[in-house]
Amino acid sequence: MEIIIAKSYEEMSEKAAQIMKEIIEENPAAVIGLPTGSTPIGMYKRLSEMCQKGELSFAKATSFNIDEYVGLPESDPNSYHYFIGEHFLNNIDIPSEKTHLPNGMAEKLEEEAENYEETLAAAGYLDVLFAGIGHDGHLGFDEPGDHFQRRTNLVDLDPITIEANSRFFNNKEEVPTQAITMGIGTMMASRKIVVMASGEGKAEIVKQLVESEVTPQLPATILHFHPNALLLLDAEAAKLL
Ligand code: PGA
């Protein structure tokens, strides 16, 4: 796992945007995996600007979001459909039929997860996956457990995740308790993985990720087994390394 430490959140976001730009320039039809959360907002802002200035085009690309809450309609500002539209997909020239998110309102959620995995498989999986890391070491919503979740599946959210994400809701009780997320196996099928972390609050989990053995108790440690994984940090997130 390669590690790059940027001086600031701005520099980290710039580097992430440049990595995405290079991938799209090399292969305009790339299949890209997209995260939500606070961390990638700076990257999305830069990529949106590049696209609006005509410096970059996602017209031939295909996107798959990593995850979506169960029970929030697309119109809910806390849904990941809404988030990724606002911050990225509505600002770029990717055709909407080439963008994918799990449907957390599906009647049969397990079937929805299986279908999402099948759609990903049919697309040849991801050329690049960008992801954040949770305070509990999750990637997407793959929470700590006694085994690595293999494929896209329906999961219960960890109390640490519910607590962390409650900052976006009126209170903790409003945070959904379940989500559909790509599994670690799905993510590992990506040709390249870029995990970003920013801020002092992530310093401890980043240290654990770098120093720990590979264990499903800290799902992101699987990155140690990936041949093309990059951990992209700002100085604060890297301060315990
Ligand atoms: P954050 O979330 O970017 O809002 O810190 C990351 C995550 O939980 O995966």
Image (cartoon, rainbow, N blue to C red):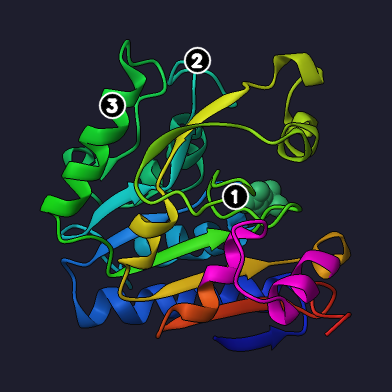
- Judging by the rendered image, the residue that carries numbered circle 2 is 71
Do the residues under discs 1 and 2 have CB atoms within 8 angstroms? no
Q: Give residue 58's quadrant in the image.
A: bottom left
Give the magenta part as a residue range: 204-222
Determine whether the beta carbon of the residue marked 3 sits less than 8 angstroms from the nearest atom of ligand 1.
Answer: no
**How many numbered discs?**
3
- Answer whether residue 206 is magenta in the image: yes
The residue under label 3 is 112
Asked if residue 228 lies in the magenta stretch, the reply is: no
SS category of the residue bearing label 1: loop
| Helix, strand or loop for the magenta stretch, by majority | helix
SS state under label 2: loop
> Local crowd at mark 3 within 10 Å, few (<14), some, or many (≥20)?
many
Q: Can you say whether 127 is above or below 65 in the image?
A: below
Q: Which is nearer the eye, 92 or 109?
A: 109
- The quarter of the picture where the C terminus appears is bottom right
CA separation, marks 2 and 3? Answer: 13 Å
Q: Along the polypeptide, which appears first: circle 2 or circle 3? A: 2
Across and down, in percent, residue 133 comes to 64, 58
Image-based side of 100 in relation to 164, left or right: left
| Location of mark 1 (residue) | 146
Dot 1 or dot 2, earlier in sequence? 2
The Cα–Cα distance between marks 1 and 2, rounded to whole angstroms, is 26 Å
Residue type, mark 3 in image: Glu
